[in-house]
Image: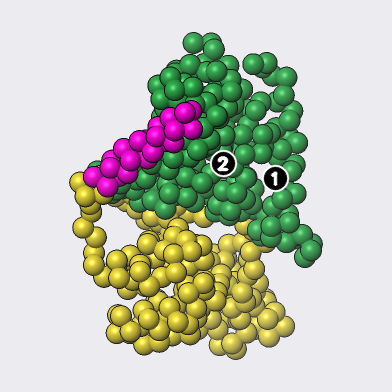
Amino acid sequence: MSIIIAVSVLLGLAIIFGMILGFSAIKFHVEGNPIVNQIDEILPQTQCGQCGHPGCRPYAESIANGEAINKCPPGGQATIEALANLLDLEVLELDGEHDENPVKTVAYIREDECIGCTKCIQACPVDAILGAAKQMHTVIIDECTGCDLCVAPCPVDCIDMLPLATNITNWKWQAPSAFSDHSHQLIATDKRPAVELES
Amino acid sequence: MSDFLLIIVSTVLVNNFVLVQFLGLCPFMGVSNKLETAMGMSLATTFVLTISSVCSYLVHEYLLTPFSLGYMKTIAFILVIAVVVQFTEMVVRKTSPLLHKVLGIFLPLITTNCAVLGVALLNIKKMNNFMESIVFGFGAALGFSLALILFSAIRERIAVADVPSPFKGAAVGMVTAGLMSLAFLGFSGLVQI
């Protein structure tokens, strides 16, 4: 007897919940962008986040907004081909790294080749280059923004842009995502007051 | 009032769900790579834990107890939690697209989080009343959020640290989680409940 009661109570509960869900699925139905739905169906729904989005649907939305289609490692080449077919795009190779941020670089002056012309000092927007006329110059790595502006003026081409790996000493918190959309490097003259950036 | 405060302190610090009771370890290790996702996950978990502890309390009190079906509580709670989460996801999606964007994918994922079921079952075991259940669920969620956000902040830093290669990735994450758990053991004895 107690088994019948238990089963019927749970069954009743399940039926009521099923009706609530079924009803609300119709009542709260959201018309999505049909393209986004189609893209979302092609993606493997592993929700792994390797594309840099929190789940497959956000990635589908940004594909619809023009993001590259080759950022889904679980889907592999088959998914890329299906997406290319759907969106009439070219088939791309799977992008394993898909670094959103370009590698940060710093200027490096080969000091024995430097003739001390001070042209790079005048070009530097952040005063990161140290030196005087006919003395060799050098770059203060912490100040350098990697803007490339000093490379062109150098008459002896002794400035290299070297990649700067992130490590525990120069690691920083990332700026909130609303600001980090500017993927280009800000140089000093680009910086506006914070108030203006927020608006 | 001081009872509720005690429950909060007890669940957030002393009996932290992740670091002391070892519930909900899956999202704790899985979603803690980025601070931003960890925050989204924490918000969603707070939401779900509070709501589901209320609902499972109601189901236990007004459905299972009258029929003396206490032994069915695990199955019934799983059902309740799944439905409540699914339902709130639909409502949030319809009414507030912005909130849905923040909580988004995390809501359905939390359905299978064992901390959620753990809170519901512990509420019954501790014989909490209605208000205590709410506070207990909310406190558990706060503790989960605290642990998750602290841990993800540490992991962002560890990701660029010079870790010996056998320890890279998940291994150093596990070691860090163990150390955090040890640190939280220091709170035991702060309150007795």
Q: Is residue B50 visible?
A: no
Give the chain of mark 1.
B
Residue B56 vertical position relative to residue A85 in the rendered view, above or below: above
- Left or right position of B193 against A19: right
Label 2 and label 1: CA atoms lie apart by 18 Å
User: Does residue B121 appear in the picture of this structure?
Assistant: yes
Location of residue A135 in the rendering, given as x and y in whole percent from the top left corner: 67, 76
Residue picked out by circle 2: B114
What residue is drawn where x is 20% and y is 46%? Answer: A27
- Mark seen at residue A107: none
Tell me if mark 1 has few (under 14), some (14-19) or many (20+) residues whose alpha carbon lies within 10 angstroms of its own: many
Residue A191: quadrant of the picture: bottom left
Q: Amino acid at mark 2?
A: Cys
Magenta region includes residue A20: yes
Upstream in the sequence, badge 2 or badge 1?
Answer: 2
Q: How is the image coloured?
A: by chain
Q: As displayed, is residue B86 above or below residue A104?
A: above
In the rendered image, which quarter contains the C terminus of chain B? top right
Residue A61, horizontal then vertical, whole percent: 33, 65
Q: Amino acid at mark 1?
A: Ala
* Location of mark 1 (residue): B177
Q: Colour of chain A?
A: yellow
Q: Which residues are magenta?
A: A1-23
In the image, the chain rendered in green is: B
Question: In this picture, is A67 found above or below B74?
Answer: below
Viewer-nearest of discs 2 and 1: 2
